[in-house]
Amino acid sequence: MARRSLLGNVIVGMAREAARAQRRAVAENRRQARDQLRFARLSEQNARLAAKEAKQQYLASRLEEADDLNFRLDGQVQELRSILSDWVAVTAESLFRSLRAVPPYPPFSPPTHLLTPGLRPVKEAYVRKVLPLTFFAKLFPKRREQHRQALLLAKEQFLEAERSYENAERNREDSLVQAHDQAAADYEAKVQERDQQITELWGAYWRHETDAVVAYAEMVLSGSTYPEDFPHEYRFAFVPESKLLVIEYELPPPGIVPTIQEYRYNRARDAIVEKANKPADCKQLYQDAVAAVGLRTMRELFSSDDAAAIQVLAFNGYIRSVDPATGKDIQPHLISVRTTRERFDELDLERVDKLVCLRNLGAQVSPRPYEIQGVKPIIDFDMVDKRFVEQADVLSALESRPNLMDLTPTEFEQLVANLFDRIGIEAKLTRSHRDGGVDVIGFDKRPVLGGKVVIQAKRYRHTVGVSAVRDLYGTMQHEGANKGILVTTAGYGPDAFTFASDKPIELIDGSGLLYLLDQQGIAARIVFPDDLAQSAGNF
């Protein structure tokens, strides 16, 4: 009984141990399953966090992209709004001093043969040419003497070659020094010539010579900085008699104005969307920019003109475009203004309304520049271009074209009447009661723009003053004319331009008259008596 009980206990113990082992295995399996589930949940959580972080990073990058676009957009708009205030004041002295800056000395580049030294002779090369004595030759004194003489000759040849080499090297080094000295002398000569030219230009500018004034104006505007996409093209004409500078200036196209007001990131579409600028805002910003370019250009030229060579400034701003009706290239003017230095200096450009300021100066400003609607320039650039002004020279006495100064006053006035008749203004001569001269009464038959025109002709050799313009204006009022035109063979003073600036008066000087005659196929020239006498004497 006891034995059975012992066996039973063993079996029961084994069964219990097996059960425990099974429970441990089940528990281990459950633990592993929980760990796998926990790991899977943790991996899934990490994946969700990574995806969320990536999404946030992507969202941040798109928002940053939109902010960057808006930053650039704001910069473009700010550049356009600050055109007038971004100018930099310069003086004539500083500009000419900058021209005198000594250019860097160029690298010395002598001929290649002066840089390469010759080959120094080697004594052994000469000695080797003498064959050594054989054993049997050494037994004969005569052969030994011949061998010694041959060695002496080889050494002498070596010494001569060495002397020639040293002479050649000294000559090469001397030539190299001479080439360097010559290059330095040429450089100094060019610097001195350049300084001399600058000095001559400086003097010519202060003497108000035409080419020097134009060159100086170009120097001033070449240093004027504008946004990168602005054109930088202009040309000048200077009338020394009137101290009038005319500038034909290319304006930027309407494309400089951003058509986008704002960039925003749309999450639903995952795209950066554009908010269009209002057409009225685009038009206003472009008109403001055009006006700013005109005022700034005049400001830069007047303020930097220390020699006071420019007393009257005419700015014609044009744009390059394409006529949608014909497809041809056109260059309509969007702004044209003429003003005197005295009147411009009275302006406080930091506080003015640009458009109102220009109109107060008597400017012609396009009412719709964004649509490229042009205006008629107050002064046609070609009418003051120096190419149409005849300069007296040794051939003037042989010139076949008639000299307008040789005409009688009546003949000159008849010529002017015929000219405007060809242009399209029906002109008739009539005796003036004030000064005994002859007025030309014209009729412009164009609808709206036409009407009665009073034209006065002055065959003068001296500058026409403001009194003649006042007389013309009085005649206009007496005749009830819509417009007055004063034509002279000379030029006009600043006061004349000031008086005419806000009135329907057009002033045509000698070069403008020659241009109009040339356009009508009438060959003429203007040579004043003193110039003609001088040219005949030179001849």
Image (cartoon, helix red, strand yellow):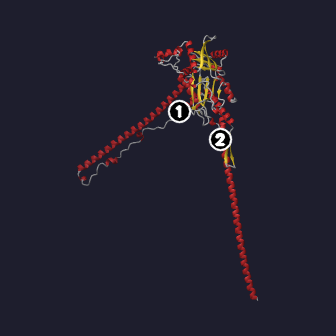
Note whether residue 154 is visible: yes
Residue under the point 43% across and 36% down: 177
Q: Which quarter of the picture shows residue 343?
A: top right
Q: Residue furthest bottom?
A: 1
Q: Secondary structure at mark 1?
A: loop
Residue under the point 40% across and 38% down: 172
- Which image quadrant: the C terminus? top left
Left or right for 455, reference 194: right
Left or right for 202, reference 359: left
Residue under the point 28% across and 51% down: 132
Q: Which residue is mark 2?
A: 72
Instruction: Find the distance from the CA under tag 1 to the CA under tag 2.
Output: 39 Å
For the residue pair 240 and 478, the one nearer the viewer reads as 478
Residue 476, position as x, y percentages in the image: 65, 16
Q: Amino acid at mark 2?
A: Arg
Residue 20, disc: none
Q: Which residue is mark 1?
A: 102
For the residue pair 472 and 142, the one nearer the viewer reads as 472
Q: Secondary structure at mark 2?
A: helix
Crowding at label 2, few (<14), some or many (≥20) Cα neighbours within 10 Å? few
503 above or below 152? above
Residue 389, position as x, y percentages in the image: 53, 21
Q: Amino acid at mark 1?
A: Val
Left or right for 192, reference 362: left
